[in-house]
Image: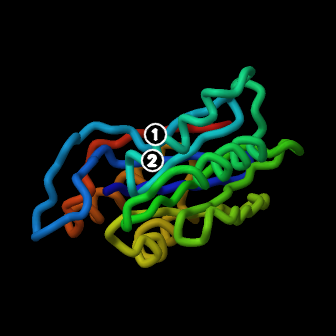
Amino acid sequence: MSAILAVCGDGFCAMVSDGRFVEEPITGDKPHVIKNDLPKVRKINRNVVVGFAGDTLAAVQIINAVDAYPGIQYLTLEKVVKILQEKAATVEVQPVGVRLIVGGRNRKGEFVMTMLGSADGYEAQTQTARPGAYLIEGACSHTDVAPWLEEEVKPQAAGWRNLDDVARTLDGCIAKMAKNDKSINTTYFRQLIR
């Protein structure tokens, strides 16, 4: 139902998603496409961006929970993760599940990436970006994203010179995944935290 790729480095966090929303469960070889231009990344404020893969309706309910908090522009990454976890506990999720990636600056100003999903009870797993290295994560509903990250994204990371290089790599990976998985398309949505 979706693909989301994220990279956090020393000084930035970038996310790219496709735009396809399909009816679940998928039956047959060709999914029933509901929408081809649905962003699956959202910039919460100047410090936090959230992306998702999986049950779109559940994910949108979970992410939109941050709108109930006054001063959304001041929410920390840690607070956003807590809000998502609390809301997720109340949302029914289809068997395809939900995977969320939250990236940006934490309370200390460090760039971090947090992954959480329905498969592991929305237990947050947070990593901090290190100077000279990249955190590279992804999620996809119907395709194992790990081999794609290993073969398409990580080998190109050493050659990245600017954010355009990062975007080209992530877009290219989603394009290749879309050739094999018809629940993914090549309508890209991007968000960046610097």
Identify the element where label 2 is drawn.
strand
Is 25 on the left-hand or right-hand side of 163? left
Residue tagged by mark 2? 16
Vertical comparison of 66 with 164: above or below: above
Q: Identify which residue is drawn at 50% across, 72% down.
A: 155
Q: Identify which residue is drawn at 61% across, 67% down.
A: 121
Is 55 on the left-hand or right-hand side of 82? left
Depth check: 30 or 152 in front?
Answer: 30
Q: Are marks 1 and 2 in contact (CB under 8 Å)?
A: yes
Q: Position of residue 16 (x, y in %)?
A: 45, 47
**Residue that extends furthest to the right in the rendered view of this protein:** 108
Is 58 on the left-hand or right-hand side of 143? right
Q: Identify which residue is drawn at 23% across, 52% down.
A: 22
Residue tagged by mark 1? 190
CA distance for labels 1 and 2: 4 Å
Q: Identify which residue is drawn at 54% across, 44% down.
A: 62
Q: Position of residue 179 (x, y in %)?
A: 20, 64
Q: What amino acid is at disc 1?
A: Arg
Q: Quadrant of residue 67?
A: top right
Q: Position of residue 83 (x, y in %)?
A: 69, 43
Q: What amino acid is at disc 2?
A: Val
Is 20 on the left-hand or right-hand side of 79? left
Residue 84 visible in the current orientation: yes
Which mark is on residue 49?
A: none
Ranked by sequence position, the earlier of labels 1 and 2 is 2
Identify the element where label 1 is drawn.
strand
Depth check: 8 or 50 in front?
Answer: 50
Q: Quadrant of residue 148?
A: bottom left
Residue 166 visible in the current orientation: no
Q: Quadrant of the N terminus?
A: bottom left
